[in-house]
Amino acid sequence: MAEFLQFAFSGLTVGAVYALVALGFTLIYNASDVVNFAQGDFVMIGGMSTVFLYATGVPLPLAAIIAILTAVIVGLLLHRLAIEPARGASPVTLIIITIGASMFIRGVAQIVFDKQFHQLPAFSGDRPIEILGATLLPQSLWVLGGGLAVFVALWLFLERTLIGKAVLATAANRLGARLVGINTAVILAIAFGVSASIGALAGVLATPITLTRFDLGTIMTLKGFAAAMLGGMGSPLGAVVGGLLLGLIEAFGAGYISSVYKDGFSFIAILVVLFVMPRGLFGGRSVERV
Amino acid sequence: MLTVEGLKARYGRIEALKGVDLTVGAGEIVALVGANGAGKTTLLRTISGIEPAAAGRIVFEGQPIERLASHVRVARGISQSPEGRQVFAPLSVEDNLRLGGYRRRDGAAAATADLERCFTLFPILKERRRQAAGSLSGGQQQMLAIGRALMAAPKLLLLDEPSLGLAPVIVDQILAAITRLRSEGMTVLLVEQNAAAALAIADRGYVLELGTVTLTGTGRALLDDPKVREAYLGV
Ligand SMILES: Nc1ncnc2c1ncn2[C@@H]1O[C@H](COP(=O)(O)OP(=O)(O)OP(=O)(O)O)[C@@H](O)[C@H]1O
Ligand SMILES: [Mg+2]
C-alpha cells in the first residue's frame, strides 16, 4: 500500500508537469491548428531563467516572474517572426517551422546559459510529508496545485470570456472569425503568449524536483505532445487527464516492472489508446462541418 | 452610405474585379446578381477587407475604408454573412451569436436586446441556442450566419447567397426576414444567384459579369429587362 501510494505520488507530480505542457499545446492548437514543437522549450526557459536570476541574487518569486515574462516574450517573438510570416502555410509546414524554432531556442540557451544541469531550492522546504507510510515532497504539492490553478484559469478563460471564445472561434473558422471583427493575428499572439507562460510556470515549479538543462525542451515536448494526443489534441480536460495518466503509467511501470523501460510503457499505452480511440480519450470535440 | 469606385481585385494573375462602380443608399436593399464566377463573392470580401483592393476606392459614410483592416470595418458598421455560412461549428448557437457582437462597445444590455431580436427573427435559433452550430441543418446555419452578422449591430449588412442550397420554404423565410430588416431601417447588399427572388425584394439591382457591372436599375426594371430575363431568369 505504501509503495503503491509512493508510485502514485511521483506519477501524479511528473504527470502534472506533462499536463501543463500539454495544456500549452492545446491552447496553440486550438487557436491555430499549429502543433507547436517548441512548447517544451518554454519549460526550459522558465526553469533556466529562474535558476540564473536566482543565482545572481534576485529573490525567487521575482526571478520566477521575470522568467515567465521572458518565456512570454519568446512566445510572442516565435509567433511574430516565425508563424505569422508563414500565415496560410500548411499545418505540416508550420510544424516544421516550430521544430526549427525549437532548435534555435536550444542553441541560444546553450550560449546564454550553459550546458550543465541546474536545480532550484524547493519553495517550502524539503521535509517530506508522510501519508499512510508514503512520503510526499512539499514541492509536489506546488506542482499539483499549480497545475490545477492553471487548468481552472484556462478553462474559465476559454469558456467564460469573450476573448477566450474568440480563440475557439478563430480555431473553428478563421474566415468567420475575421468577419465578426476578431483580429485573428492578435488572438494567435495571445495564444502563444499564454501558452508560453504556462510552459514556463511548469518549468519554475518542476525544477526543484526534476533538474533542468538547455535541452530539457526536447523531452518535455515529446511527453507533453504524447499527453495531449492521449487526452485528445485540442481538449483542455484531455490534456490534464492525458498528462496525469502518462505520469502514472511511467511511475507504476518503472516501480513495478523496470525503470529501464519507463518511456516504453507510456508509448505503448499511447499506441493502444490511439488504436482504440483515434481521437484520444477526450477528442470528440470536432463537429462535422456542413 | 456605401460607394464603390473603380474597384479592382485579383487572385494572383486572375483579375476577379475589373473596376466595379456601385452605390448603396441608406435603408435600401440592393441586389447583386450574376453568373458563377462573376466576382460577386470577391466584391463582398473586398468590401469587408478579407481581400485587398488592387485599385479603386471604397467609401463608407464619407470615409475611405479600402485600407482598413477587416476588424476595423466591422467596428465601423459593416458586417457580412458569408458564402458557405462559415459558422463556428463546435461552438454553441448562442456563442456564435455573441461572437457576432465581438466589436460592439455599447454594453451587454444592448447586445442582449439584439440577441432577443435575432431570436424573434429566427425562433428556431432560440430553441437550439445550446446546441453546437455544426449540428444545425443548412437552413438553420444560414439563419445563424445572418443572425451572427446582425449581432454586430451593423449599418450595412452584406449577404452572400443566403438561399444557396436551401428548401423553398426556408428561402421564403429568409427573404421575409431580409424584407423585415429593411422595414426596421437596415441597409442590405444582397448577393444572389436566385436572381428572381433577389430582384423581387430589392429596391435596386446590379448585374455583374466577369468582374464588371453590365446593367443597373430598379429591381422591377431589371426583372422586366429582356437580357436579364434571358440570362438569369431562364425565361
Ligand atoms: N481564392 C481564389 N483564388 C483564385 N481565384 C479565385 C479565388 N476565389 C475566386 N476566384 C476566381 O475569381 C473569380 C470570381 O469568383 P467569385 O467567387 O467572386 O465569383 P462569384 O460571383 O461569387 O461566383 P459564385 O456564384 O460561384 O459564388 C472566378 O473566376 C473564380 O474562379
Ligand atoms: Mg460567390
Image (cartoon, coloured by chain):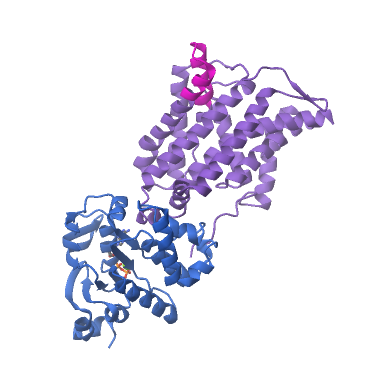
Chain colours: A purple, B blue
Q: Residue at x 56, y 27 (%)?
A: A203
Magenta residue check for A53: yes
Rendering quarter of residue A270: top right
Identify the main secondary structure in magenta: helix
Q: Residue at x 47, y 44 (%)?
A: A34
Q: Is residue B195 left or right of residue B173?
A: left
Query: In which quadrant will I find the N terminus of chain A?
Result: top right
Q: Position of residue B218 (x, y in %)?
A: 19, 79
Q: Is residue A258 left or right of residue A54?
A: right
In the orientation shown, which residue stands out farthest toward the bottom?
B235
Q: Residue at x 19, y 86 (%)?
A: B226
In the orientation shown, which residue stands out farthest toward the front?
B109
Q: Residue at x 42, y 56 (%)?
A: B109
Rendering quarter of residue A111: top left
Out of B1 and A89, give the one closest to the viewer: B1
Q: Position of residue B228 (x, y in %)?
A: 22, 82
Q: Position of residue A80 (x, y in %)?
A: 36, 36
Q: Is A287 situated above or below A237?
A: below
Q: Is A177 situated above or below A105?
A: below
Rendering quarter of residue B219: bottom left
Q: Position of residue A29 (x, y in %)?
A: 50, 45
Q: Quadrant of ligand 1?
A: bottom left
Magenta residue check for A190: no
Q: What is the count of numbered marks?
A: 0
Q: Is residue A217 visible?
A: yes
Out of A98 and B194, give the one closest to the viewer: B194
Question: Which region is colored magenta?
Answer: A44-66
In the orientation shown, which residue stands out farthest toward the right?
A1
